[in-house]
Amino acid sequence: MTSQLHKKGEAWSARFSEPMSDLVKRYTSSVFFDKRLGLVDIEGSLAHAAMLAAQGIIGAADLAAIQQGMAQIRGEIERGEFDWQLDLEDVHLNIEARLTALIGDAGKRLHTGRSRNDQVATDIRLWLRGEIDQTSALLNALRAALIDLAEQHAATIMPGFTHLQVAQPVTFGHHLLAYVEMFARDAERMRDCRTRVNRLPLGAAALAGTSYPIDRAAVARTLGFDGICANSLDAVSDRDFAIEFTAAAALVMTHVSRLAEELVLWMSPRVGFIDLADRFCTGSSIMPQKKNPDVPELARGKTGRVNGHLMALLTLMKGQPLAYNKDNQEDKEPLFDTVDTVTDTLRIFAELVSGITVKSDAMRSAALQGFSTATDLADYLVKRGLAFRDAHEAVARAVRICVDRQCDLADLTLEQMRAELPNVAHLIGEDVFEYLTLEGSVASRNHPGGTAPEQVLAAARAARAALPHQA
Ligand code: ARG
């Protein structure tokens, strides 16, 4: 019985007197999701084997056999021919069993001085490091697409909103560059998170380290890690790096969801500021006239999914005693799905942004409604000596008059304005109308961080210069 179990590759089977039930096997196995780590598992094993040979722990012939066997297995995985078996529990035992089947005893020596505990922690870090680089590249592509559009619309005027009420005119380019700032911080967070991901757990073995004369620094160098995890108990057990990545990804999705919400709003026929390319929209099965912004809506919805994964990982880690516990096997699906969701979303958004049609006329006429230059009129009076609170009061009165007459501030004649605002009439000159125009309003906010077209162009240039150089 025991030797049969051994043949099936259960690494610990000699200790047991009855086989695992099928239900428990299914419950405890992870191979059908962690097989995604197959290639990094091989990479880690090859670095470990090379170190074992360099330290004289295994022979040169064993190393050569392991390298040759792993090359074959890598090919099988890449071609989709590898026969993943539930009975073999996880990606690590599947690959090790296949290696031993291919090369015999040398395959059994690979696991010397190592445990699946430090192996899996190493695999996730290797894999996640690559995915962080991918996510960063996609964030940069989205930033570039937004910068391009912002530059084209440095002088396009739209209403800026607070409380979703028309507030002051802004330039569309300025509005887009707000998102560029958000995604730049997201990219910074990814970079920062990567430094903590990029540490080598291998050598921690099960939890306490190993009695073999290993060289952890050499393995770290081979695998491109910046250094080793300093404490073996911590190395095998904490998944804070995965939580940190997921938190950063949740912020990416949160920022995407804000942009998504605005795209949905802007595309609504009631607003009509933009149009999205047909390839990002769908129709309705019943209402023939519909063109729905499904992609931004889905992105908005998928944000909840990533937030959920963050909660799952935090809860998974909470209260776990040192060192490794099987709970940690549950880190993978949330992490994998977070990566898939955020990378798919970013990829599609970079394209979607490049395909936006801007309807400047609709933006402009919306900015003309809602007294968006009322603050400018107040500022005009202040510059002529009135205290701001008094100016605010006077303009509020003027707005009320315009609401009653159903006209805009700029529609009042100079005489009407003076007549309606007798207290400040002496301060109002012909030049007031320059301040009341949309162009005058945005052009006057001409300081770093302001909405003036000149500033938008400068900010777009700076944002482009901040992008990592494209190879
Ligand atoms: N599949 C396991 C995981 O993902 C690998 C480590 C298992 N270690 C153990 N002692 N059961 O965490």
Image: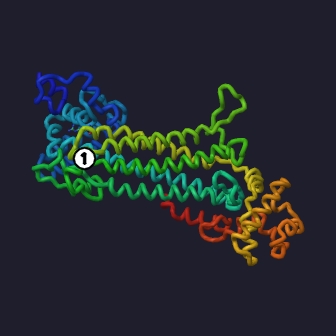
- In x, y percent, where is residue 8? 19, 26
User: Which quarter of the rendering shows the N terminus?
Assistant: top left
Q: Amino acid at mark 1?
A: Ser
- Placement of 358 over or under 431, stated as above or below: above
- Whether residue 43 is visible, yes or no, is no
- Placement of 11 over or under 153, stated as above or below: above
- Placement of 422 over or under 16, stated as above or below: below
* Residue at the spot 68% in from the left edge and 60% down from the top edge: 170
- In x, y percent, where is residue 61? 15, 44
Q: Is residue 159 left or right of residue 331?
A: right
Residue behind mark 1: 237
* Residue at the spot 61% in from the left edge and 56% down from the top edge: 176
**Could you tell me which secondary element the residue under label 1 belongs to?**
helix
Q: How many marks?
A: 1
Q: Quadrant of residue 438?
A: bottom right
Q: Nearer the viewer, residue 332 or 414?
A: 414
- Whether residue 76 is visible, yes or no, is yes
Q: Nearer the viewer, residue 413 or 419?
A: 419
Q: Quadrant of residue 229?
A: bottom left
- In x, y percent, where is residue 465? 53, 65
* Residue at the spot 50% in from the left edge and 52% down from the top edge: 139
Q: Nearer the viewer, residue 400 or 161?
A: 400
- In x, y percent, where is residue 228? 24, 56
Q: Is mark 1 within 8 Å of ligand 1?
A: no
Furthest residue toward bottom: 385
